[in-house]
Image (cartoon, rainbow, N blue to C red):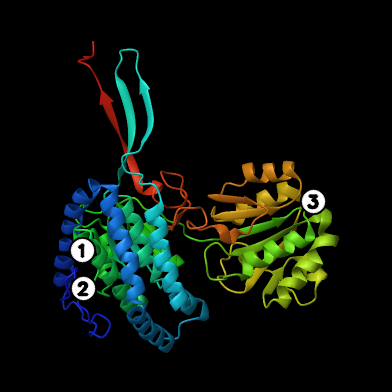
Amino acid sequence: MIEASETESNFVTAPLKSIETNADVVALMRGIGTRARAAARVLALAPTDQKNRALAAMAKAIRVAAPEILLANGRDIDEARGNGATGAFLDRLTLTQAGIGGVADGLDAIRALPDPVGQVTERWTRPNDMTIERVRVPLGVIGIIYESRPNVTADAGALCLKSGNAAILRGGSDSYRSSRAIHAALVAGLRDARLPEDCIQLVPTRDREAVGLMLRGLDGNIDVIVPRGGKSLVARVQEEARVPVFAHLEGVCHVYVDRAADLDMAKKIVLNAKMRRTGVCGAAETLLVDSGAADRLLKPLVAMLIEAGCEVRGDEAVCAADRRVRPASEEDWPKEYLDAIIAAKVVDGVDGAIAHIERYGSHHTDAIVTADQAAADKFLRGVDSAIVLHNASTQFADGGEFGFGAEIGIATGKMHARGPVGLEQLTSFKYRVHGTGQTRP
């Protein structure tokens, strides 16, 4: 059995071990939960300087270990390719030298952010001279279940650390070696700052039962679950979890091009929103064009997408604009393609766009392109999504782009956290009440 705190220098070349029985998995996960709770109590009281020292040491260790991380990632990619992984899947799995540098830079960015723990967000005095403060505190222990993206190991671990939370990371089987290599660097940073190594634990088994145990809360030791992965993973988490979940099921994102849009700006935004990275949750999946300017806007937008290698599936008006367009079916409008495919439709102005997004969207990220401020204001008020943008690409749906340093995920629910989940969203609050001997009559 691999211990959760394993950090031996030959972690890349060591054989992948497995847990022999269900009882072994249960015992392993219970131990992880118990240790995480103990570490969370220490971390909640850790001073900012100590957490920042750990983050600096982690970033340095990741840069130093880049060759080992790349070697581990190469083995994961070979295995995934041998198992028939798609191009989009391999894109999410792949690390490069520059990408590893970006992971380390992300840790430095998180280190530079203000520590939310202990911040007094409000303070007021009652008529009886009693003072009440609302103060940010960590959530406790956060379980992160993710697929294919090994960089999540660093992003999630660092965000949890800075916000005073212990993390239990369960990466996908496909990125198992890569995640182990990155996690070893995180543990080195914890050790350097004299923080418990159990502050960030990586589940050391590919057994899927470990996920089920996390969803059941590990005997009350997990406070929040954050899934990062495909629809089937998120659906399972939302269906089975017995603890709160920060998540989004799909990223069915729209770009609406209004009649008052500048064509050059619209082309730039639409192309970036769809084609910059097609496999991310902020990629545009549907293009909506105002019927009031379809004769000016539709044909050049569709031609641009097709010539960039994007398949366009459109309604009758879109098909008439370019014979290369495939007719869209009803199943296309709520579809998250995560590929170089986009659905396109002509709608009746802002109201038509809002109605379409409300019917088919996923409340993730939606954008309007227009020079009409009144139209933009109406769209931003009327679209009930976690992120709404005016004259900007949907691919800005990212915690790093919001100035959060990184994100642990994007939530589309309305309780507690919504949009990119960063440091602030990983805290709750408590009330501190200061009196001078007051009693209640």
Can see residue 202?
no
Residue type, numbered disc 3: Ala
- Badge 2 or badge 1: first in the primary sequence: 2
Camera-nearest residue between 85 and 276: 276
Instruction: Return the x and y of residue 165 as percentages of the image width and height.
Output: 28, 52
Q: Which residue is mark 2?
A: 7
Distance Cα–Cα, label 2 vs label 1: 11 Å
Q: Verify CB contact (< 8 Å) between mark 2 and mark 1.
A: yes
Distance Cα–Cα, label 1 vs label 3: 57 Å
Residue type, numbered disc 1: Arg
Q: Residues within 10 Å of mark 1 (few under 14, many from 20)?
A: some
Q: How many numbered discs?
A: 3
- As drawn, 358 above or below 103: above
Q: Which residue is mark 3?
A: 260
**Horizontal placement of 409 versus 356: left or right?**
left
Q: Nearer the viewer, mark 2 or mark 3?
A: 2
Q: Residues within 10 Å of mark 3 (few under 14, many from 20)?
A: some
Camera-nearest residue between 90 and 162: 162
Q: Quadrant of the N terminus?
A: bottom left
Q: Quadrant of residue 263?
A: bottom right
Label 2: which secondary element = loop
Q: Nearer the viewer, mark 1 or mark 3?
A: 1
Q: Verify CB contact (< 8 Å) between mark 2 and mark 3.
A: no
- Badge 2 or badge 3: first in the primary sequence: 2
Q: Which residue is mark 1?
A: 191
Instruction: Return the x and y of residue 140 as percentages of the image width and height.
Output: 26, 49
Instruction: Return the x and y of residue 163 as percentages of the image width and height.
Output: 33, 50
